[in-house]
């Protein structure tokens, strides 16, 4: 959204403030314009600062005290909820003194007032989706019978089924979503306007079975909208609540997240998926958590994180609640260059969420779109991958599973990875490192000599039928000839590219740790060397799309560590967002980048990241996520075009008198010639 368009937009309702549309316009002394009805209601509630630039107004819009702001508002359609008109527009005679007037009614003691879900029918038939697919690829197809290998890799991949266009609502899990939004003073102006647009996009994307609650925080936190279904009425009321937000006060991250968790913990009804979207543009200034950057020691997240609930920070569990129930993923969005990336990454990482770095303010809607595209396409839950040794002497040595919990048991004969939710078309790939023994009984035909390596199975819960599904993969085997042929010695490119992914993720994490201790040149040198090694690998030489994308990401991270100032402003956040994406193999937004289409084009708004190298691979982004981003971008283009149309019309009208004057001059000249 361009700033020129923002100047033609009412920052309160986000509608156009072009003249000639049948609405009274108030233009303040600071030159910002608003609908008179919108700004009049804001001033009635004691807000005498410009919602855009925060300038104090001397000339205020005059509002008649008997005006009834309830006339055109729709009440909530469920009798268990208070009238939304009273919630947002208290009667004038009930107003408190200026600066102490609440816009929203008092919160209940408990948030068990969530809107009930529709009754579940007795039909629990499967969702109609295909099953999760399993693939397994050994590092090499053959190993000499007389050879033992202490570390041999087997790539195991899982892929979720697709969602059909005509049955998306029936094949995915409905969601309970809480947005926790920073509305401190630093969010004033275009930042808050763009945030409102982004949240309204999320509202429009949710279905009637999905529920949304909105929490805002500055010095204190408030639940400004209860957990309600996004029916037509629910969407209208949610937008009305969001559009009334104003920026002021300090930043209290702890209270904001506590309030968001409270909504989910105290709800009476439960959708299968529950998540928190958390956005902030600053550091917590209310819990003594601010830490000045220091290069004498590695920076750590602030101590105030121990104040957060265990349902988003499991490390805060006491000895009595180690078996605590649900963990709510927090998808954190650091907005601009002044947010606290260490804190936001730590919160998202501990809750199995993602951390995105929104460098350009105009990117916030696309970033939300990518995230919500995944959350609205959950097709499997409680996904668990199990591998078991299939022969004596084959031992599981290690499972580098990123941020997914893994375990090796039974003296190396069994391994498990707990993955959890899977989005439609999402893929997860893991390297299982095993030992391959000498083939002791090398009898029979050489072509038939084989060693069975791994049995692979997975289990998950179908989101529609709620039934547990068990899937068995093919037995993983390799040939055991006396002397392998040259093709038998070639490492599989899929295994090699997965090694490159793990190496790139570890390189970025290691460089980030070095940069935090002040060794910026060492961090850059490490990334440069690892990039060269990646490009020299078999998959890099083959021009593999993932490898090209990894190399471009490492190069961009390296460049953002070019100076202490740049690292503090953007490099740390960029690296941590990268680490979040690789740790969970899930897409995040970084810098000023947004994927325009899956497997297609990509747009890079700043920096010199090699777009052409990575355009064919938009790391971890699923088709549904990319489709949601494309919808967001198309909506922005449409709104830009709509906002600019009145201006073009005015120019045309202005030119009309000139055309008439020219015509008159021509007629006069003709008359003189005659």
Image: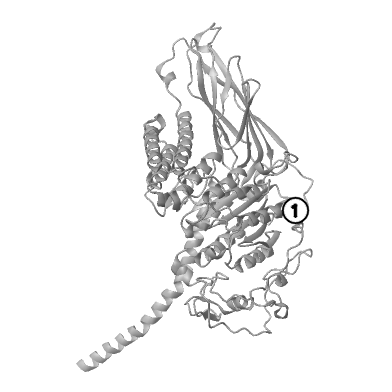
What residue would you read off at disc 1?
266
Q: Residue at x 61, y 14 (%)?
A: 392
Displayed quadrant of residue 383: top right
Q: Residue at x 37, y 82 (%)?
A: 656
Q: Position of residue 43 (x, y in %)?
A: 60, 77
On the question of residue 396 being in view, the answer is yes
Camera-nearest residue between 622 and 148: 148
Q: Position of residue 355 (x, y in %)?
A: 54, 48
On the question of residue 375 being in view, the answer is no
Q: Is 142 rendered above or below residue 24? A: above
- Is residue 610 left or right of 143 when viewed as pictured? left
Camera-nearest residue between 210 and 282: 282
* Total number of numbered discs in the rendering: 1
Q: Residue at x 69, y 84 (%)?
A: 66
Q: Is 655 rendered above or below residue 539? A: below
- Is residue 94 left or right of 528 when viewed as pictured? right
């Amino acid at each position: 959204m361009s700033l020129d368009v923002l100047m033609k937009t009412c920052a309160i309702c986000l509608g156009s403030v072009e003249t000639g549309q049948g609405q009274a316009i108030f233009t303040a002394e600071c030159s910002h314009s608003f609908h008179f009805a919108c700004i009049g209601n804001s001033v009635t509630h004691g807000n005498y600062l410009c919602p855009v630039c925060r300038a104090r107004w001397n000339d205020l819009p005059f509002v008649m005290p008997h005006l009834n702001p309830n006339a055109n508002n729709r009440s909530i359609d469920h009798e268990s909820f208070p009238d939304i008109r009273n919630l947002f527009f208290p009667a004038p005679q009930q107003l408190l003194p200026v600066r102490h007037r609440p816009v929203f009614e008092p919160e209940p003691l408990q948030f068990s007032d969530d809107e009930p879900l529709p009754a579940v029918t007795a039909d629990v038939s499967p969702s109609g989706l295909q099953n999760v697919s399993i693939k397994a690829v050994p590092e090499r197809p053959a190993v000499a019978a007389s050879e033992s290998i202490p570390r041999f890799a087997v790539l195991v991949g899982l892929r979720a089924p697709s969602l059909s266009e005509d049955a998306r609502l029936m094949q995915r899990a409905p969601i309970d979503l809480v947005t926790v939004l920073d509305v401190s003073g630093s969010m004033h102006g275009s930042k808050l306007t763009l945030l409102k647009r982004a949240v309204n996009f999320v509202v429009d994307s949710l279905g009637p079975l999905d529920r949304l609650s909105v929490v805002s925080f500055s010095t204190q936190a408030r639940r400004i909208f209860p957990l309600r279904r996004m029916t037509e009425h629910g969407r209208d009321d949610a937008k009305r609540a969001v559009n009334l937000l104003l920026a002021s006060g300090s930043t209290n991250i702890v209270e904001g997240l506590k309030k968001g968790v409270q909504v989910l913990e105290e709800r009476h009804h439960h959708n299968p998926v529950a998540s928190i979207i958390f956005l902030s543009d600053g550091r917590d200034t209310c819990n003594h958590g601010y830490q000045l950057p220091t290069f004498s020691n590695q920076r750590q997240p602030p101590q105030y994180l121990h104040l957060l609930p265990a349902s988003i920070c499991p490390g805060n569990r006491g000895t009595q609640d180690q078996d605590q129930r649900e963990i709510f993923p927090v998808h954190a969005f650091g907005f601009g260059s002044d947010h606290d990336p260490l804190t936001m990454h730590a919160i998202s990482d501990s809750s199995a969420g993602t951390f995105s770095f929104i460098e350009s303010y105009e990117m916030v809607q696309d970033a939300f779109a990518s995230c919500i595209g995944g959350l609205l396409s959950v097709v499997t839950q409680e996904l668990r991958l199990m591998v078991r040794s299939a022969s004596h002497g084959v031992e599981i040595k290690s499972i580098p599973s990123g941020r997914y919990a893994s375990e090796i048991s039974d003296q190396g004969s069994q391994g498990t990875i707990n993955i959890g939710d899977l989005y439609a078309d999402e893929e997860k790939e893991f390297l299982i490192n095993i030992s391959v023994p000498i083939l002791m009984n090398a009898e029979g035909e050489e072509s038939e000599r084989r060693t069975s390596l791994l049995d692979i199975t997975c289990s998950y819960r179908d989101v529609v039928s709620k039934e547990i599904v068990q899937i068995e993969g093919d037995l993983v085997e390799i040939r055991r000839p006396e002397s392998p042929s040259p093709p038998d010695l070639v490492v599989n490119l899929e295994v090699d590219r997965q090694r490159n992914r793990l190496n790139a993720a570890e390189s970025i994490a290691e460089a980030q740790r070095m940069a935090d201790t002040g060794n910026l040149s060492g961090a850059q040198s490490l990334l440069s060397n690892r990039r060269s090694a990646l490009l020299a690998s078999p998959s890099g030489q083959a021009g593999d799309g993932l490898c090209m994308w990894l190399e471009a990401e490492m190069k961009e991270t390296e460049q953002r560590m070019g100076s202490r100032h740049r690292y503090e402003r953007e490099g740390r956040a960029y690296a941590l967002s990268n680490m979040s994406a690789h740790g969970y193999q899930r897409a995040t937004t970084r810098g000023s980048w947004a994927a325009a289409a899956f497997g297609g084009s990509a747009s890079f708004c700043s920096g010199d990241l090699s777009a052409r190298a990575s355009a064919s691979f938009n790391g971890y982004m699923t088709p549904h996520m990319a489709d949601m981003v494309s919808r967001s971008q198309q909506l922005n283009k449409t709104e830009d075009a709509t906002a600019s149309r009145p201006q073009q019309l005015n120019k045309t009208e202005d030119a009309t008198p000139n055309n008439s004057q020219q015509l008159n001059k021509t007629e006069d000249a003709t008359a003189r010639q005659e």
